[in-house]
Image: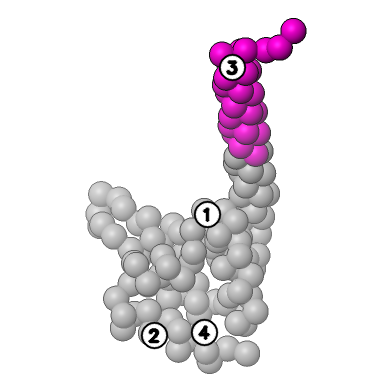
Amino acid sequence: METSDAEKIQNLKTVVIYSTLGVGTATGLFLLGRHFYKKSQANRSEKHSLEEGDPATYAKQLKMAFDNDNYLSWGTDEEAITKVFQELPSKRMFERVQKEYFRMYSRSLNADLEEELSSEEYNNLIRLLNAKK
């Protein structure tokens, strides 16, 4: 008994539908797992952000300076950012802060610095950083 063309088409449609559902489910599970992994990494970094001298602490201080929106002032707290850069012991520590910042906020620290600061303020921070070993 041969299968008709209509049955072949119906079988093909069924295979395509189930394959699409399978790929969609796998993609969704991957993205969900990735979300929870990133969230756990951020939580782990957040726990260290209260320890003085930890890269997560510096990252959190910078983020708080960017988000300095309160009833007295709006915008970025440039003085707080400069203070963090002055406290950084080395260029290596800044690299670690960049990694922690990305881990905690899923954003590039350099991009946020460029966005939040004028070019003169940004260049002054880079000079501060270049003066460190």
In this view, the residue in front, 36 or 49, is: 36
Is residue 35 one of those drawn in magenta?
no
Under mark 2, the amino acid is Asn
Image point (58%, 88%), residue name: 132
Under mark 4, the amino acid is Leu
**Mark 3 vs 4: CB contact within 8 A:** no
- Give the mark, 1 or 2, whose residue is nearer the N terminus: 1
- Give the mark, 4 or 1, whose residue is nearer the N terminus: 1
Image point (62%, 18%), residue name: 8
In the image, the segment drawn in magenta is 1-30
Residue indicated by mark 1: 106
Splitting the image into 4 quarters, where does residue 29 fall? top right
**Where 8 sits versus 49, above or below?**
above
10 Å crowding of disc 1: few (<14), some (14-19), many (20+): few
Label 1 and label 3: CA atoms lie apart by 52 Å
- Residue 123, percent from left and from top: 38, 84
**Mark 1 vs 3: CB contact within 8 A:** no
Residue indicated by mark 2: 124
- Give the mark, 3 or 4, whose residue is nearer the N terminus: 3
Is residue 17 one of those drawn in magenta?
yes
Which secondary structure dominates the residues rendered in magenta? helix
- Give the mark, 1 or 3, whose residue is nearer the N terminus: 3
